[in-house]
Amino acid sequence: MASTITCASCGMQYDGSSLQPGVQFKCTGCGEMVLVGGAPAAVGVKRGTRKVGGGAMQGGRPAPQRAAAGRPAPGGYQNQQQQPQFGAPPKKDNTMMFVGIGIGVVVVGVLIAVVVMSGKPSPQQEQARAEEDANAKKKKEVADEDAKRKKTNDSMEAVYRGAHELGPKIAAALSAKDDGGFFKTNVDWGMMTAKQREVLQGKDGAKWLGDPLYCVGEWVKEEKEKGILVRWAGKAERGPDDMQQRFATYFGFQYQGSECTYDKALSEHEKSAFSWAVAGKRFLGKKVQINNKTSAKPLLFYCGAEEGKTNVMIIWIDDPKAKENITKKEAPYERKPRPEDDPQNLGTDPQDPMNPTRPDPGTDTTEPVELPVAVKTGDQPPAGALSNVLRDIRDGNNLSEPQIKSVQNATNSKEDKKKFLGACIDIIMDMRDKNDRSGIAAATSNLYKIFKNMLTRDQKDYIYDFQLGGDPTTDDWPVRCWYEFYQTYKA
């Protein structure tokens, strides 16, 4: 191995005893690369004449010069060989390193992109997930609705049971000589007052003001043709305490000591359920029906509770005969005396010119004093429209215009119409025996609308006014007039 290495460009010599052939390094003299083991090129000086490093050339070649101690080894060697102990190290080339780093960054970015893209769901997956979410939401809504409905149904069933349990107790309290304790504790009198206030503010408010059971007011006398009418002039709804006392007084004189029964079948029927909105609250419950022999129509006790609660109370009482019963008890009709009631007229006959009845001023002397006493006919119309209308008359309902025309229809024979008339007279006589004055008033008014074109007397003779007509069990003039018409009706 050569111990001296000469630069081919400038002739600079180096100690190469520790270098391997093939290693390159930069010449410190000219900056050119020197190859260890390569043939030195010719230089632009004569051999043996140039001094290198201060030494003379020997044998045509420059004398070798030893590198100074501690001189840095040249860089830029190949195959990681030891640097020479003299001359500047060659510069290191980092191009490939930067290229490798760039390629690595690109590869990592691609891998990240692939991972991200592979994690994003496809449109089909997104649609499937959306459908799953929608189904889950719907199932939850259905479950919540079922739970709410079950809670409501359970509450309603509890209220219905409570209402049915109150029925027999109400009947017993009405019949017994109760001091009002049952109704005082089992009626929500505050709700009764609130309900009555809303009724008075409705379209039928003026009508309800005339009810002495629910409204405060006073009795007012009015002079009428046949007598003095006393009516209730209401002013406002009663307060809770006042209403409780008024009902206790009314139940006392009207029902105590009489037989009252709980109508279980009608009270538990599905049609007896009610739902009311009163004072911004909704109430659910059942209408408990109580029958009494002194009344042609049942009493209805609305037993219920606020929606979602189960504390059942009586929140409304409907007695269709209350106004009539109280009026009869506290302000009976005062009829003007008739000529035949005068003791001086006893034994006289208004139809006998030789023994006339002295007329009373202001009395209609053209009205016959007597008519045949009405007796039941036993008639029944054939099944169909006539029997349906007859049922409504029996229930005390006012007939509609189509119902009136269905009876007047020419397709009904005169014989069927007379049977219908006879059946109506029988119904009126039953109402008279029960002292059902409002029922008689409705029935006679309906009959007058049907047969008015065939009647010979004034309207007032055929229609019973329960406010003016007195006691129908003794004053049965309209019934006799209808029976007279029945007898003269030609079938």
Image (cartoon, helix red, strand yellow):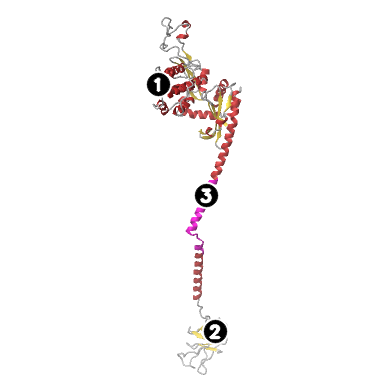
Q: Amino acid at mark 1?
A: Lys
Q: Secondary structure at mark 1?
A: helix
Q: Disc 1 designates what residue?
A: 452
Say few, some or many: other residues with alpha carbon within 10 Å of mark 3 (under 14 / 14 to 19 / 20 or more). Answer: few
* Residue 405 falls in image quadrant: top left
Q: Disc 2 designates what residue?
A: 86
Q: Check the picture and name the quadrant holding the C terminus.
A: top left
408 relative position to 135: left or right? left
From mark 3 to mark 2, how far is it between C-alphas?
85 Å
Q: Earlier in the sequence, mark 1 or mark 2?
A: 2
Magenta stretch: includes residue 487: no
Q: Which mark is residue 140?
A: none
Q: Amino acid at mark 3?
A: Lys
Of 181 and 421, the residue lying toward us: 421
Q: Disc 3 designates what residue?
A: 137
Magenta residue span: 115-143
Q: Amino acid at mark 2?
A: Phe
